[in-house]
Amino acid sequence: MYVTRRQYPDSLFAVCAATFAIFVMKLSGSFGEKPWRDEIISIAVAQTENYMNIIHAVYTGIDATPPTFITIEWLVLAIFGRELSPLILIRAINVALLALTFVNLNKICQFFVDRRTSILGLAIFASINSGRLISLAIEARTYTLYMLAASLGMLCALRFVEKPSKRILIHLSLSLLLLVATHTFGVIYAVIIGGSLTTVTMARLGHSRAVQVAAACAPAGLLFLIWAPIMAHQSQLGSWIVAPDVPVLLSAYWLSPSSIGVFITAGCILFLQNEKGHLRRAVRLAKFSFVTLVVAGVTGATMLIGLFSKIVFPIYVQRYFFPNLLITLIPCLIFATWVLKMRRHKIQWRIVLAATAVLLCCISWTNKVRSTRIQCRALTDNLLPLGRTIITPNLDIWLTMLNDKWIKVLGVVDEDTFHGSSIYRFEQKYLRAFSDTLGIGSIVHRSELILSSENFSILDESSSSWAKDLQSNSKFAVVLRNEEDGCKLWDVTRANQTEAAFDKFGNSFLPDRRP
């Protein structure tokens, strides 16, 4: 028995509404989460009153992404004033950008399926990726705009495939420019989208049309060439990226157990229901060919960058490949198409729809949103009664305490930044560049600290030898006050202010070389 038209939309709407309602509930519950290091940096840069400080911060590598999103942050904070929480304002912007991304994805899906299938497919997509999408929305950085720009590029390209026109080419050119201006790795997706569209256009419409497409994509490449010298200057700050292993490489495809399950289910549906003929006919269509080329290009580029990072120089970070998440929308649409085909049978339709609703709600509710580990948070929350100057050589701890409006916190830098691991050297240079460029926070050199300071406290990771070095000096009384969450808090008191104290301890450090 066929389900009536009235029953069909109502029950489908209930499933999609329940899935999106859980998504919104989890999103609202995550809004108050503490920012992590990169968010603190982004907000601090955006709060500067002089826009030239932002340009200087980007040029020196304090914020290494192109300044598009941070300019939006700066404008919003300038318009709404400093009374409202900058973190909440920026996260509200990201939620709006994520909503626009879903609007674009809905339009993209409707090139291949009808409206109801598209909505159910997006509900499945939001469910299996709820943790990642919510983490994307509350990340007070450029990545939501990055996803929006990638979806805009795909939408404009598909519109050109279906109905070529110069107006759509202009829109495509602007969307690819936004993609490159949003993130350094956006040029990869701009090249893939532009190259795939050029290939499909040449096969369908000939050489002259393909040249027009290539010309529309050229400004994005030119923008990247303009950005390249700035990237070279940013590299002087050093790098914190480590070489990835195989699980980290695979993580760029955003495969979770639930998404893998949808992939396997979609594959079984295609083959068990004898859909091979439909697939062969679909491949002949230009829009399917375009999507196939894009997926192949994204997969190949991600693996090549991963191998380059493993063998030559590490540049691979998982979040740089956030647009890869859009690939998981394909099996979601296949699964949604199969679910809606079951409406021809009343009993099977109700069972399948009920099972889908329960499964989506459970997956969406149990998916973990990012859990930001603020280093030494348990100790920093209880430091106020000390009334002592807090010293930390750790970049994460220093920025966290600055964000919590600590006044008596000093970052410690070495005079010689050429020893230690690459990550340590990066953090030392970053401490100095952040304070000098933005005029936020205070730093002190080790030699100055040892010469002039009498009483202070050191907050650092338990594995650090910084306090142990002081403890080995008989001229300093070093007492462990507290240890928690992998961090230690030391109270340091100078036992006798003599020059010998510095001479004995100074063997480990070079003299002050600041100009």
Image: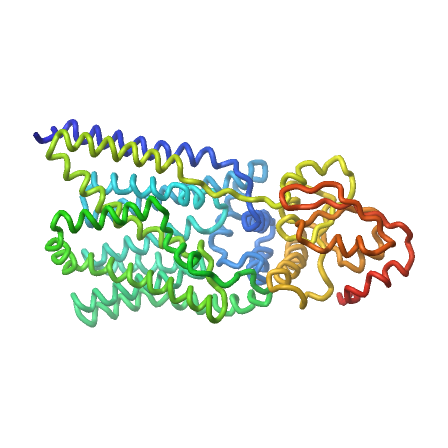
Query: For residue 412, which quarter of the picture?
Result: bottom right
Residue 142: % across, % down: 46, 51
How did the renderer colour the structure?
Answer: rainbow
Task: Please provide percent x and percent y for residue 288.
Answer: 20, 57
Quadrant of the rendered structure where residue 223 is? Answer: bottom left
Of the pair 176 and 357, the residue shown nearer to us: 357
Quarter of the image with the C terminus is: bottom right
Residue 438 falls left or right of residue 153 = right
Check the picture and name the quadrant holding the N terminus. Answer: top left
- Front one among 501 and 410: 501
As rendered, which of 41 and 157 lies closer to the eye? 41
Which residue is painted at 75% across and 41% down in the image? 481
Give the quarter of the image for residue 21: top left
Instruction: Name the foreground residue: 357 vs 405.
Output: 357
Residue located at (27% from left, 32% from top)? 15
Relative to 10, say whether 223 is above or below.
Answer: below
Residue at 42% from the left image edge and 67% from the top image edge: 307
Residue at 27%, 60% in the rendered image:
169
67 vs 435, left or right, is left
Q: In the image, residue 492 lies at what x, y percent? A: 81, 48
Q: Is 343 placed left or right of 232 in the picture?
A: left
Give the image location of residue 426, x and y in percent.
61, 61
- How many numbered marks does the figure carry? 0
In the rendered view, does 359 fall on the left or right side of 320? left
